[in-house]
Amino acid sequence: MMLSNRLQAVKNLVSPCEVAADIGCDHAYLAIELVKDHIAKRVIATDINAGPLKIAEEHIREAGLENCITTIQCDGITGIYADTIIICGMGGKLMLRILTDSLKELEHATTLILQPQSEIAQFRNGLCELGFEIVDEDFVIEDGKYYPMMKAQKGQMFLNDITATYGPVLLKKKHPDLKVFLKQQNAYLTDLLEELKRFSSEKSVKRIEQIAEELQLNEKALRLIETET
């Protein structure tokens, strides 16, 4: 079974564990590969929808892993106890709500593998407020889309605007795909700013200020990545 580049990168962030929980498992491709490669001894695969979970169960049976992978239809991680919790492909606001609503379950978990699709900076800051620090990150380009992902463990971490937006570990690694993203974003924001300056309404002035701040942050991140160490 071939994982997508995104799911392969997520899998690479998972350390060997007794029990992993794949929240929103879709068709259970990741869960199956985690067991087959002896990364997780057992996996709890969950999804809020019955349809994808039924397909996941078929894939699990085909792989002969019914004794190692348990499926549960549920919303979030309430009542799910695992060493490693994996949540991918959801909006950052939703993911943060799921984590915040499950503090008891988070006490049991030692590691979180997370791939938010939106509100990335707010999500990273929220993760810190929950008592987790980002210990590793990856950044994947797939089908023209960009996917940041992170590995978090219990601990304290301070983020500023740049590290919250673009990732403390990604910036430290000078991740090449992040550099590609930053350059494309820089060009887009520059063009957008020039276009907005043609207008003079109150609404456009506020938008200009916002885009100018985003561009300034982008340029700072680019300088960090392009600076030789």
Image (cartoon, helix red, strand yellow):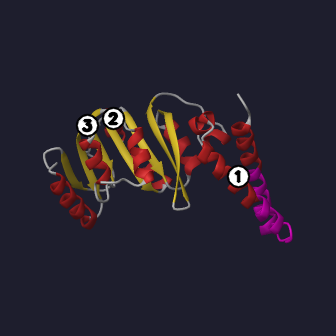
User: Where 18 sits versus 179, above or below?
Assistant: above
Q: CA distance from mark 1 to mark 3?
A: 38 Å
State yes or no: residue 205 in magenta: yes
N-terminal label among 2 and 3: 3
Three-letter amino acid code at the position of disc 3: His
Mark 2: secondary structure: loop
Q: Amino acid at mark 2?
A: Ala
Given the image, on which type of amino acid does mark 1 rest? Lys
Can I make out residue 49 in this image? yes
Provide the residue designation for mark 1: 183
Residue at x-position 39% and y-position 49%: 87
Query: Mark 2 or 1 closer to N-term?
Result: 2
Query: SS for tag 3?
Result: loop
Q: Which residue is mark 2?
A: 109
Q: Residue 182, position in %: x, y?
A: 67, 50
In front of the other: 31 or 2:
2
Circles 1, 3 touching at the beta carbon (< 8 Å) = no
Residue displayed at 65% across by 50% down: 180
* 136 to the left or right of 33: right
Q: Residue drawn 59% across and 47% down?
A: 177
Magenta residues, as a range?
190-215
Q: Are there few (<14), some (14-19), or many (20+) residues within 10 Å of tag 3?
A: few
Tell me the residue that label 3 is attached to.
38
Q: Main secondary structure of the magenta part?
A: helix
